[in-house]
C-alpha cells in the first residue's frame, strides 16, 4: 500500500506518460495524413480535368469525323442507292448523336462550352434532318439537294472549323487547358513528394526526440532509486525523494520509508545491545569477582566438590563475558565504528600461536593436526617464511581461533585436521580441512551468514555469531572467507592480502 493509493485514479503513471508520448507523433501523423489527402485530392482533380479535357477534344473530333462521314455516305447513297452506304450513314449518325450527348454532359460545368456544345448538337440534328429531306428528293435533284438546302453553310462551318464555329470555341479552350495541365500535374506531384519527405523527417525526429527524452526521464529516476538503494546498504544519507505520482516515485517513497524504518531499528538494536551487554556484564563481573574470592578461600573453607562447582561457574561466566564482548565487537564491525590496527604481522606465526592455544582441545578429541606451510609450493621452515600482512593482530587471532574451533567441533574423534598455508597470486591463503559432516551447496553458501539456521554440531546460536564475526573481521582486512565440501572433507579457506616488504 502506497501513500497515493486513495488517489490512484487521478495518478499519472508511467503507462499514461508513455501513452501521451505515443499520442504526440500520432497526432502529427493524423495531421500529416489529412494534408496528404488534401494534396492527393488536388492532384486527382487536376488529373480528372485533364482526362475530361481530353474526352472533350475526342468528342469534338469524333463529331467532325462522323458529320463528314455521314455527309459523304448520304451523298453517295443518294446517288447510287447502295444499301451498304445507307447502313454506313445510319451508323455514323448514331455515333454522331451519342458523342453530341456526351459532349453536352462533359461541358455542363463551363457555360461557354455548354452553349457551344448545345449549338453544335442543334446543328448536327438540323443537318441530319436536312439529310433525310435530301434523301427523299426527286432522282434528278438528288445530288444538288445537298448543296441547295438552307443548313449547308452551317455544315461547312462545322467541317472547316472556322474561328466563329462552336467546335473551334471548345477545341481552343481545351487545348489551352491541355498545355497547362502537365505543369500543374508536375507541381502537384512535387508538392506530394516534398510533403512526404518533410513529414517523414519530422515524424522520425519527433519520435526519436520523445523516445530519448522519455528514456532519459525514466533512466534518471531509476538511477536515483538505485543510488538510494546503494546508499541505504552503505548507511549513507539518501537523495531527496522524487517528485511525481508515477510508480517510480512510489518506489522511491517506499525506499525512503523502509530506510527510515531500518535506521530506526538499527539504532534501537544498538541501544538494546549496548544496554543488555552493560546490564549483563556488570553483574557477571561482580559474580566473577565473588567466585574468585571464594575459590581463593577469602570467604571461608569449601569442600572439594564445592570448589569444583565454583570453578565450573567461573568458566561459564567467562564464556558469557566473552560472548557479550564478541557480540559488541560484531555490532561495532557491522556499524563500521571499530578501529582496526595497521601493524605488520606474520600469518604463519599467528597460526602457530593459535595452534598452541588450541592444542588441549585437539588432545581432548584425539585429533591429529597436519600442518603444511609453503611458499610457492615447497614446505619451508617456520623461521624462514614470508607470510606477512598488515592488520590487527588481536582481531585476526580471534578470527583464526574461531576457524580452528569450528574445525575441532566438526571433526570426528581420532580424525585428522589438515592446515595448509601458502601464497597464491599475491594473497595469503589459509585452508583448514576436516572430515566432519558434508555441507550442501546452500549450507556452504550461508555458512558465515548471521541469519542461517543452526546445525546439530554447532552447539547453539553462539557459533553462528562467532562465524559471522569472523567474516566481518576478514572483510575489514580486505580479505574473504569461504567454505566448500567434497565427498569426504570440508575446507574453510581464508584469503588475505600479502605484504612482501616488512620490517623485522
Image: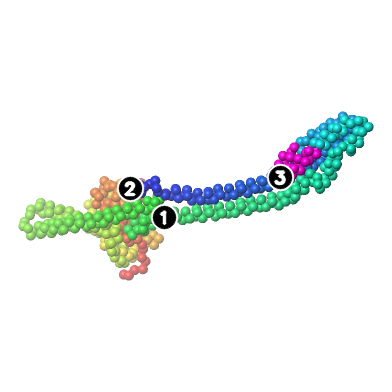
Which mark is nearer the camera, 1 or 2? 1
Quarter of image, res 339? bottom left
Residue at the far left: name it: 300
For mark 1, give the secondary structure: helix
Q: In x, y percent, where is residue 337?
A: 28, 62
- Residue in the foreground of this view, choosing between 326 and 255: 255
Q: In x, y percent, where is residue 96?
A: 79, 37
Observer able to see residue 369: no
For mark 2, give the secondary structure: helix
Quarter of image, res 332? bottom left
Residue at 73% across, 45% down: 112
For mark 3, give the secondary structure: loop
Determine crowd level at label 2: few under 14, some 14-19, many 20+ residues with C-alpha closer than 10 A: some
Q: Earlier in the sequence, mark 2 or mark 3?
A: 3
Label 3, label 1: how far apart the Cα atoms are: 67 Å
- Residue in the foreground of this view, choosing between 46 and 15: 46
Q: In x, y percent, where is residue 182?
A: 72, 50
* Residues rendered magenta in the picture: 101-124
Give the label on residue 443, or none.
2
Determine crowd level at label 1: few under 14, some 14-19, many 20+ residues with C-alpha closer than 10 A: some
Q: Mark 1 near mark 2, Cβ–Cβ under 8 Å?
A: no
Label 1, label 2: how far apart the Cα atoms are: 38 Å
Residue at 63% across, 53% down: 194
Q: Earlier in the sequence, mark 1 or mark 2?
A: 1
Location of residue 268 with respect to 121 vertically, above or below: below
**Which quadrant of the figure contains the C terminus?**
bottom left
Disc 3 designates what residue? 110
Q: Earlier in the sequence, mark 3 or mark 1?
A: 3
Location of residue 76 with respect to 19 vertically, above or below: above
Disc 1 designates what residue? 221
Residue at 57% across, 50% down: 32
Amino acid at each position: 500500500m502506497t501513500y497515493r493509493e486513495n488517489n490512484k485514479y487521478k495518478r499519472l503513471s508511467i503507462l499514461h506518460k508513455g501513452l501521451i508520448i505515443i499520442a504526440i507523433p500520432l497526432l502529427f501523423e493524423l495531421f500529416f495524413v489529412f494534408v496528404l489527402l488534401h494534396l492527393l485530392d488536388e492532384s486527382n482533380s487536376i488529373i480528372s480535368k485533364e482526362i475530361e479535357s481530353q474526352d472533350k477534344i475526342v468528342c469534338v473530333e469524333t463529331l467532325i469525323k462522323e458529320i463528314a462521314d455521314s455527309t459523304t455516305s448520304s451523298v453517295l447513297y443518294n446517288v447510287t442507292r447502295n444499301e451498304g452506304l445507307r447502313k454506313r450513314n445510319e451508323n455514323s449518325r448514331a455515333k454522331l448523336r451519342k458523342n453530341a450527348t456526351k459532349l453536352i454532359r462533359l461541358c455542363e460545368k463551363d457555360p461557354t462550352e455548354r452553349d457551344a456544345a448545345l449549338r453544335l448538337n442543334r446543328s448536327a440534328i438540323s443537318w441530319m434532318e436536312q439529310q433525310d429531306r435530301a434523301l427523299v428528293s426527286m432522282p434528278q435533284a438528288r445530288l444538288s439537294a445537298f448543296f441547295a438546302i438552307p443548313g449547308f453553310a452551317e455544315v461547312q462551318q462545322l467541317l472547316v472549323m472556322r474561328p466563329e464555329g462552336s467546335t473551334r470555341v471548345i477545341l481552343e479552350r481545351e487545348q489551352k487547358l491541355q498545355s497547362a495541365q502537365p505543369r500543374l500535374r508536375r507541381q502537384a506531384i512535387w508538392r506530394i513528394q516534398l510533403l512526404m519527405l518533410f513529414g517523414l523527417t519530422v515524424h522520425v525526429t519527433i519520435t526519436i526526440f520523445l523516445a530519448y527524452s522519455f528514456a532519459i526521464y525514466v533512466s534518471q529516476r531509476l538511477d536515483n532509486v538505485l543510488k538510494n538503494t546503494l546508499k541505504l546498504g552503505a548507511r549513507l544519507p539518501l537523495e531527496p525523494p522524487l517528485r511525481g505520482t508515477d510508480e517510480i516515485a512510489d518506489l522511491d517513497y517506499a525506499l525512503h520509508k523502509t530506510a527510515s524504518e531500518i535506521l530506526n531499528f538499527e539504532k534501537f538494536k544498538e541501544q538494546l545491545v549496548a544496554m543488555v551487554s552493560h546490564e549483563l556484564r556488570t553483574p557477571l563481573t561482580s559474580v566473577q569477582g565473588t567466585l574468585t574470592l571464594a575459590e581463593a578461600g577469602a570467604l571461608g573453607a569449601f569442600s572439594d566438590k564445592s570448589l569444583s562447582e565454583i570453578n565450573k561457574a567461573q568458566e561459564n561466566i567467562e564464556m558469557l563475558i566473552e560472548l557479550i564482548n564478541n557480540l559488541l565487537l560484531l555490532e561495532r564491525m557491522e556499524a563500521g565504528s571499530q578501529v582496526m590496527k595497521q601493524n605488520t604481522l606474520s600469518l604463519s606465526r599467528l597460526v602457530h600461536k593459535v595452534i598452541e592455544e588450541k592444542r588441549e582441545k585437539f588432545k581432548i578429541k584425539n585429533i591429529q593436526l597436519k600442518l603444511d606451510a609453503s611458499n610457492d609450493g615447497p614446505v619451508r621452515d617456520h623461521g624462514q617464511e614470508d607470510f606477512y600482512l598488515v592488520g590487527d593482530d588481536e582481531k585476526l587471532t580471534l578470527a583464526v581461533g574461531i576457524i580452528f574451533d569450528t574445525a575441532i567441533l566438526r571433526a570426528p574423534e581420532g580424525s585428522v585436521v589438515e592446515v595448509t598455508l601458502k601464497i597464491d597470486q599475491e594473497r595469503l591463503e589459509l585452508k583448514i580441512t576436516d572430515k566432519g559432516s558434508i555441507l550442501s551447496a546452500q549450507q556452504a553458501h550461508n555458512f558465515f551468514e548471521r541469519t542461517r539456521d543452526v546445525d546439530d554440531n554447532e552447539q547453539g546460536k553462539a557459533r553462528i555469531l562467532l562465524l559471522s564475526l569472523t567474516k566481518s573481521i576478514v572483510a575489514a582486512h580486505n580479505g574473504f572467507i569461504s567454505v566448500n565440501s567434497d565427498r569426504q572433507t570440508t575446507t574453510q579457506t581464508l584469503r588475505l592480502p600479502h605484504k612482501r616488504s616488512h620490517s623485522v
